Image (cartoon, rainbow, N blue to C red):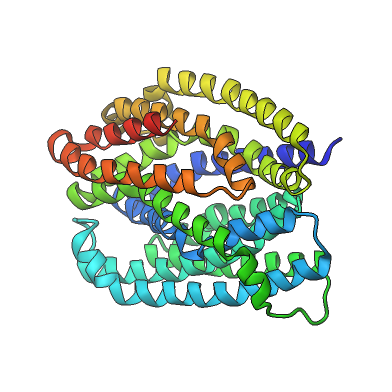
Amino acid sequence: MKLVTKNIIANYLGKIWGFVSIFVFIRLYINLLGIESYAIINFYTVILGLLVFADGGLTATLTRELARDIAISQKSNLVHTFERLYLAVCLLIIVSIYFSADLIANNFLQSKTYSVSQVAHYIRLIGVGVGLQLFSTLYDGGLQGLQQQVLTNKIRILWSLFKAGIVLLPLYFYPNLEVFFWWQILCNVVLLVVFRHKLRMLLPNAKPLFSIALLKSSSKYAIGMMGIAFISAINIQIDKLVVSKYLTVELFGHYSIASTLAQLPVVAIGPIITAVFPLLSNAVSKQDIRSIQLNFHKYSFLITVLATPVVLCAGIYAEPLVNLWTGKPDIANSIEIVVRMLLIGALFLCFQMTPYYLALANGFTGINLYSGIAGLLIIVPMMVYTINHYGMFGATMPWVFVNVASF
């Protein structure tokens, strides 16, 4: 079996487990903690999504560089160099969120259950968890560049089991957000240590060096990726951020459920594109044009035929799916149309993936950056207007428009 096929299968197993765990555990979180607590838990995902740009493009750059045909010692030095920079970035994130927690709590997450000071405390814990999880993505990206997706998915499945599943045991006896967020921090520390150890084992070097030359050679690509990640993060998370500001925490919780279900097509094609990016990067480094062409068309077709029926089925059965998932008929009825609109946007996001990663494999970051900026200039004022006038449904309109236009 080809390595890329093994990686795709491993990625699918990881994604399937991730979705099954979400499907099972979110309902239990809502039953144990309530919809407002779940909304605050989901704010962790929003902050994490907004801060993916903070790595300065280092993770994507490391994935691409480790997939290239270069010496092991050079790869080891690159990891050593990047992790020093990444440590500073993650510490800065933790400190920044800690001191801005009161400001965030006063302007977002209008809760009836928790005081502003309680929400601010939970946001500080979220900051620590996010910083640790971001740090682990650097090593995850390095392992993916080495085409070790089988290994990374084994680790992530175990981490997800403890992070999202085993946490229900302490929550059953002590059902509060304090327990939940400290458990996330502990799991993220373990993930970080394991990923770093595995990457170091694959790149043996007793004395890796901090290399300014390697940093300079990849800086242009890293800066471009930072810009793309920053713009993409805002475009993807802006709907949730504006909903959390202009609507109640309860409605934000409802929207979060709709948004999670609407990720189905992205979940369906994610394992493919994760395995294909290193493949394209390696072919580009060897100037193997024939391989690039064949893989581009093959995987573009595969993504299309996988994502489209997923969107159709999830859209048709949106209400019974949400009802089965949450056990709350009122929530299912209120977000049915929201799920369908978000699914349409997600479908066109899937259609963009192969050309997007082909451009990145070639080091062409400009087209993705400029289209992202154009989308951002449109989506922010549209989002504020449509949510103020059409509520939760209004948040879906700019999302669909921008993804169709980008495609």
Q: Residue 168 location in percent, x, y? A: 50, 55
- Left or right, residue 373 beside residue 137: left
Q: Residue 255 location in percent, x, y? A: 31, 40
Q: Residue 101 location in percent, x, y? A: 29, 71
Rendered residue at 34%/41% (across/down): 375
In this rendered view, identify the residue nearer to me: 50 or 34: 50
Q: Quadrant of residue 330?
A: top left
Rendered residue at 82%/66% (across/down): 72
The answer to whether residue 333 is above or below residue 382 is: above
Evaluate whether residue 190 shows in this view.
no
- Left or right, residue 4 beside residue 259: right
- Left or right, residue 343 beside residue 288: left
In this rendered view, identify the residue nearer to me: 26 or 299: 299
Rendered residue at 64%/46% (across/down): 361
Q: Quadrant of residue 211?
A: bottom right
Q: Quadrant of the C terminus?
A: top left
Q: Quadrant of residue 293?
A: top right
The answer to whether residue 220 is above or below residue 362 is: below
Q: Quadrant of the N terminus?
A: top right
Evaluate whether residue 91 shows in this view.
yes
